[in-house]
Image: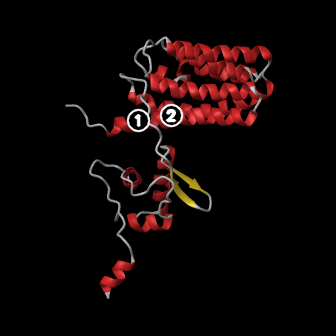
């Protein structure tokens, strides 16, 4: 009878979360276990993770631990909570070569924090630019976009041109405070410039193609005076950057230390 009851309960869950010997937290343990299951195909894109109550029982942790672990997976672009429906697995982000060979990994977390702040400011700037830009500012935006593409095609560093494009979008709001904010951030506005050991370092072409497509979508929406599309395109661009740099940070923390 006990065997029959066991067969009706389905496969066993992952079991209690145990603190790793390296001193990681319970949140990290649950997060890593769920990530491994997602990457192994146990939860496929579009499928729903177990409920919060189920994961609480399976890992023998509190609801707070489960929520923070799911939030970490969401920040990595692996899952998406949907109100009233649960947490769903997303398609894995397309692999993109990251732009550095030599990088100051200590500063990546600061760059991610800055990207979050920029998202709050520049998404609104893109919407205002779509409403308010003048014909002369439209011409400037298109010229700055072409300059980024030209530098990339020539194999030249694109950081200066990238900064100039974002500054032109801020100025097209016709609210000088947006431009002042970006100018105050200065060179740290472009993470690959702030993190690289060399101002002359160029990014892989695949990476630049992704950035170029995101820039093009932003400028096109502004030129067409599509406020919501401009906001959405800027949000996608900056959120994509956050995902890329979190992946870079994770790959570094997972790498074995050299002797």
Q: First in sequence: mark 2 or mark 1?
A: 2
Q: Is residue 94 left or right of residue 225?
A: left
Q: Position of residue 133 (x, y in %)?
A: 78, 22
**In the picture shown, does residue 21 fall above or below 122?**
below
Task: Determine the secondary structure under disc 2.
Answer: helix
The image quadrant that residue 224 belongs to is top right
Which residue is pictured at 41% across the width and 63% down the height? 61
Which residue has dot 1 on it?
Answer: 249
Task: Determine the secondary structure under disc 1.
Answer: helix
Q: Position of residue 175 (x, y in %)?
A: 76, 23
* Callout 2–callout 1 Cβ contact below 8 Å: yes
**In the picture shown, does residue 172 fall above or below 25?**
above
Give the number of the disc on residue 134: none
Which residue is pictured at 46% across the width and 38% down the height? 94
The image quadrant that residue 170 belongs to is top right
Q: Position of residue 55 (x, y in %)?
A: 44, 64
* Front residue (pair 119, 135): 135
The quarter of the picture where the N terminus appears is bottom left
Which residue has dot 2 on it?
Answer: 112
Q: Position of residue 14 (x, y in %)?
A: 35, 63
Which residue is pictured at 52% across the width and 55% down the height? 88
């Amino acid at each position: 009878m006990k065997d029959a009851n066991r067969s009706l309960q389905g496969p066993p869950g992952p079991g209690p979360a145990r603190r790793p010997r390296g001193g990681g937290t319970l949140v990290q343990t649950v997060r890593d276990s769920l990530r491994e299951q997602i990457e192994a195909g146990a939860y496929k894109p579009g499928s729903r993770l177990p409920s919060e109550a189920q994961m609480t029982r399976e890992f023998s942790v509190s609801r707070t631990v489960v929520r923070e672990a799911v939030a970490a997976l969401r920040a990595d672009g692996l899952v998406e909570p949907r109100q009233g429906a649960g947490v769903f697995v997303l398609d894995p982000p397309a692999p993109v070569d990251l732009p550095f060979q030599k990088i100051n990994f200590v500063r990546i977390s600061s760059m991610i924090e800055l990207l979050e702040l920029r998202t709050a400011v520049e998404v609104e700037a893109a919407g205002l630019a779509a409403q308010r830009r003048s014909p002369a500012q439209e011409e400037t935006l298109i010229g700055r976009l072409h300059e980024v593409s030209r530098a990339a095609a020539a194999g030249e560093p694109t950081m200066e041109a990238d900064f100039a494009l974002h500054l032109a979008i801020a100025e097209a709001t016709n609210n000088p405070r947006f431009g002042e904010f970006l100018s105050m951030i200065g060179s740290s506005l472009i993470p690959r410039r702030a993190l690289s050991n060399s101002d002359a370092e160029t990014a892989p072409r695949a990476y630049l193609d992704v950035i170029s497509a995101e820039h093009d979508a932003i400028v096109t929406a502004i030129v067409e005076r599509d406020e919501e599309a401009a906001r959405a395109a800027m949000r996608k661009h900056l959120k994509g950057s956050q995902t890329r740099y979190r992946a870079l940070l994770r790959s570094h923390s997972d790498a074995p230390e050299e002797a």
